[in-house]
Image (cartoon, rainbow, N blue to C red):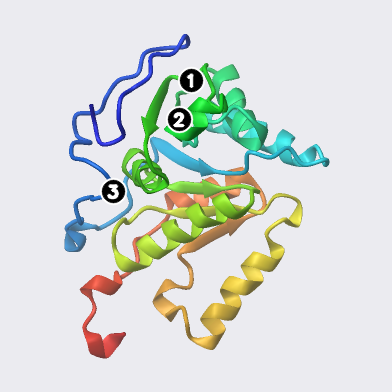
Amino acid sequence: MGRFGAGVPLPHGPTHPNPSLSGRGYIGTLPTLPTWRSAPPMKRLAVYCGSATPADPVYIDSARAVGRALAERGIGVVYGGGRLGLMGAVADGAIEAGGEVIGVIPTALVKAEAAHRGLSELHVVETMHQRKQAFTDLADGFVTIPGGTGTMDELWEAMSWAQLGYHAKPVGLLNVAGFYDHLIAFVAKMAEVGFVRPMHRDILIVADTLDVLLDRMAAHTPVRAIITMAATDL
């Protein structure tokens, strides 16, 4: 059993516990920040998105296209393990294109029959904190597509952890059909007022198309982490 709990064997393929993910619960190991010269190669990306199905088909269609495009690039998908809404569409798109899809889902949602049963791997965890830690540990970066409050929780944590220095991975936002226009403006407002430091204002990498977003993420350079700064610099 790894940090994320027992693996669940699935029809599409076995679950392979990762021996490097030892330990329990939410506690992780703080990286050695000065050794970060560049972000790791993007072999897997965590995709954050909603489990709802909006009336406008552009959202489901774009989610399926994201999964398919990542698989075609040879990039594995790490996501919330659900079969519904945009989550299910991302997974289905990647699976249909022959890609690797790893789900991480809380026990409560498995019991609610919301888990996708066609994944390469499914990790079942007890808490949402463990779920988000798993996303960070398993993925080499983060892509957020449209979603609701849960998606925002995941996005903000990825950005916050990058600022602090708990990871050095690129944080991308795919602005499908202008969905995130106001969020992008809000992030700019935080920087303008001074709640986001100049060195951290570009942590969120934004694009309207996936190809452009992935190219920008691949060129990502880790920022100076807050935990490496003197109090006088904060």
189 above or below 174?
below
- Reading the image, the residue beneath label 2 is 103
Give how far apart the Cα atoms at labels 3 and 2 are: 17 Å
- In what element is the residue under mark 1? loop
Q: Residues within 10 Å of mark 3 (few under 14, many from 20)?
A: some
Q: Residues within 10 Å of mark 1 (few under 14, many from 20)?
A: many
139 above or below 193?
above
Which residue in the rendered view is the most extreme toward the bottom? 232
Which residue in the rendered view is the most extreme toward the right? 55
Of badges 3 and 2, the one in the foreground is: 3
Front position in the image: 5 or 97:
5
Give how far apart the Cα atoms at labels 2 and 1 are: 7 Å
Q: Are marks 3 and 2 in contact (CB under 8 Å)?
A: no
- Image coordinates of residue 182 in percent, x first then y, are 70, 67
160 above or below 66?
below
217 relative to 161 in the view: left or right: right
- Reading the image, the residue beneath label 3 is 26
User: First in sequence: mark 2 or mark 1?
Assistant: 2
* Amino acid type of the residue that numbered disc 1 sits on in the rendered structure: Leu
> Quarter holding the N terminus?
top left
Q: Are marks 2 and 1 in contact (CB under 8 Å)?
A: yes
> Quarter holding the C terminus?
bottom left
- Reading the image, the residue beneath label 1 is 119
- In what element is the residue under mark 3? loop
- Image coordinates of residue 172 in percent, x first then y, are 52, 53
* Amino acid type of the residue that numbered disc 3 sits on in the rendered structure: Tyr
57 relative to 67 in the view: left or right: right
* Amino acid type of the residue that numbered disc 2 sits on in the rendered structure: Gly
User: First in sequence: mark 1 or mark 3?
Assistant: 3
| Rendered residue at 43%/58% (across/down) | 157
| Rendered residue at 36%/13% (across/down) | 14
